[in-house]
Image (tube, grey):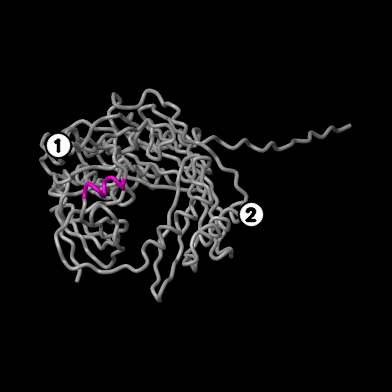
Amino acid sequence: MHSTAIKTRQRARPRSNEGVLRQALDAARGRGATAAEAEIGTGSGLTVTVRNGEVETVEHQADKGLNITVYVGRRKGSAGTTDFCDKALADTVAAACTIAEYASEDPCAGLIDRAFLARSIPDLDLHHPWTLAPEEAIELACECEQHAREADPRVTNSDGTQVSTYSGSHLYGNTHGFAGGWEWSSHTFDCSMIAGSGGGMQRDGWFTRARDHLDLEDARSLGRHAAARTTARLGARRLNTRNAPVIFEAPVAGGLFGAFVSAVSGAALYRKASFLLGRLGTAVFANHVRIHEEPYLKKGMGSAPFDNDGMATQARDLVRDGVLQGYVLSAYSARKLGMAPTGNAGGVHNLIVEHGGKDLSALLKTMDTGLLITDLIGFGVNQVTGDYSRGAAGFWVQGGEIQYPVEEITVAGNLADMYRRIVEIGGDVDRRGNIQTGSVLIERLTIAGE
């Protein structure tokens, strides 16, 4: 009698992202790296676009990727992969190590010091998946378009309405023994319409964005808001060239403070390519301005427990009473400047511009006569000199009331002067992004027109 043993192959359980991360870091050490760091991002989402009630696109998105940076002494190499199998990971690590071998030495390269690593990872309520079927997204977008059309007969066409949902995860680890991450989500509902009257056509719209889809503006409100902004631009005129007070409406005012963040970021400073170079501890804004970072806001679009170096983020003032209190530094840029890192590898986290109690209507009355900017075109900011010049559209204001829409104009000034001439910041705060500010009234700018 002969017995036959029957062997069954068991399917290996898929490794967790933590396991993949650790395998990559161990492989880097095994190939002679003195230190290494890696991050893994995964996620999936749905985007649906409709135009005039017809479906234009339905896109399903699935993302997965690992990026690893290795250090051989003070030489650095980086590589990435979307394949997490053993061979792909080994090849990716090998590629990073090969790059490091040929790289020039940089005395500032390396992991952040252990003392700065995050010691706890609080739950910031960032993960709210939205299980939205394509049919539901299409219905929602069509409903929004319909409300926009019904809001005003001058709304004659659509430039597209989009519903987008995404949920993902972020994981970071390094050979200091640090590993951590969080799950997150971001959902957007965007409506853009076209209005026509007397042979003139205008396009505008509105969007809503949130971590939790329950916090999004509803289809009716969004559609009517988009229609109102579009029809308000009909009959736009040009202005003669002049100097006048200007209000940047909240959705575009964020760009003013984005330019400020760039100017106080480490890379611009150590390259000596910033108009705010050497201004630490001096007045750079009007003395009533306070700008602070709040990385632990629940559901905040810029919230994060640690930065891209693994350093704990921190609530802090960047500007207090108009005076620059600190820079925006990663571990690398901090070393280049001989300073301590600030938890800003990857940027700021919920930049809050403190505001007064006036809504936009009250701010217009404070301005009395001038320009309300609601749209900016192009990118005309010189980070070295601070010179600012942007194409713009908006409304001319007299007696504190909007008189008529304007277009095809350019506003120009210098950011260093503009910051010092901020008269007031409104309470109409736009909370849809990483920079949260109300509308900004600036004492005077050059308006170039006819």
Residue 373, above or below 120: below
Label of residue 287 in the image = 1
Residue range corresponding to the magenta coloring: 360-367
The stretch drawn in magenta includes residue 170: no
Relative placement, left or right, of 163 versus 431 is: right
Relative placement, left or right, of 236 versus 441 is: right
Residue 38: where, in percent of width, then height? Answer: 40, 38
Residue 116, above or below 276: above
| Residue type indicated by callout 2 | Glu
Disc 2 target residue: 135
Q: Main secondary structure of the magenta part?
A: helix
Where disc 1 sits, the SS reads loop
Q: CA distance from mark 2 to mark 1?
A: 53 Å
CA neighbours of label 2 inside 10 A, class few (<14), some (14 to 19), many (20+): few
Label of residue 36 in the image = none
Where disc 2 sits, the SS reads helix
Q: Where, quadrant-wise, is the C terminus in this rendering?
A: bottom left
Residue 427: where, in percent of width, then height? Answer: 31, 40
